[in-house]
Amino acid sequence: MLLAPLRWALRFAILVVTVIVLYFAVTLVQVWLTSRQYDPHPAGAILVMGAAQDDCVPTLDLNARLDQALTLYHQGYAHLIMLTGGKQLGDKCTEAQSGAMYLEARGVPSNDILQAGGNDSYENIADAQSALLAHDARVVLVTTDPFHEDRSMAIASTLALMPSPTPTQTSPIRGWSTLPYFAKETVGVGLGRIIGYNHLEWLHDA
């Protein structure tokens, strides 16, 4: 008599696991497809997602994002660059400050650079939102690593911004080394839709 309930419980468990696997498989495909999109057009600002800096010097990853923003800026797609990213304990500069110094050294006027803080992707964009809206820059070009593009745009959309993908074309993270990043972003996007992107602070960003 106990076999029937156990059989139904097993079938239900298999169904749940199958649905979860399919959900994250579809999410992975979406994250990958978004990583391949590049859609620059006139916008209010270029939104650069933060990445690590070392003693006020951008790391290679942040450097690639800043170079992409610089390209878009010089191509005339936007005349404001919003830099995001806070700092870790003991750091002299925030990620945004190190980025600002990098861009200013390459000819971008300080008046064309905005800065926001934050220790994760959601905080980065949430902290930038008010300044962007104050500058009538609701339409933004999101510049980050390709694998990080989908989640960044999803967060921007939830915060009343209108994002378009302009991922860096020179990321130092490429080839097989991107696999764990795509896996992490798949989890982030998949869970973010369910529990909210503001509850993913444990998901350390690149």
Image (cartoon, rainbow, N blue to C red):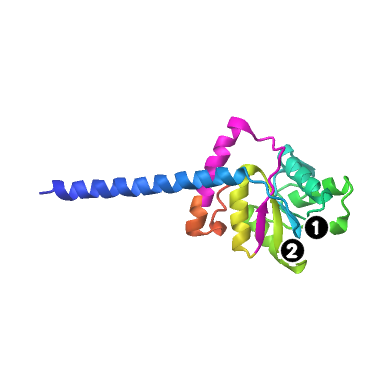
| Residue under numbered circle 2 | 137
Give the quadrant of residue 54: top right
Stretch of the chain drawn in magenta: 161-189
The relative height of residue 63 versus residue 159 in the rendered view (above or below) is above
Asked if labels 2 and 1 touch by Cβ distance under 8 angstroms, the answer is yes
Q: Nearer the viewer, residue 131 or 74?
A: 74
Locate the C terminus and report the quarter of the image it occupies: top right
Which residue is found at the position 77% from the left and 57% from the top?
115
Residue 196 drawn at (x, y percent): 52, 59
Q: In the displayed image of the protein, which residue is found farthest to the top?
A: 176
Task: Let me know if residue 152 appears in the view.
Answer: yes
Amino acid type assigned to the residue bearing label 2 in the image: Ala
Which disc number belongs to residue 80?
Answer: 1
Which residue is found at the position 65% from the left and 35% from the top?
173
As drawn, is 185 to the left or to the right of 129? left
As drawn, is 81 to the left or to the right of 163? right
Residue 126 drawn at (x, y percent): 65, 61
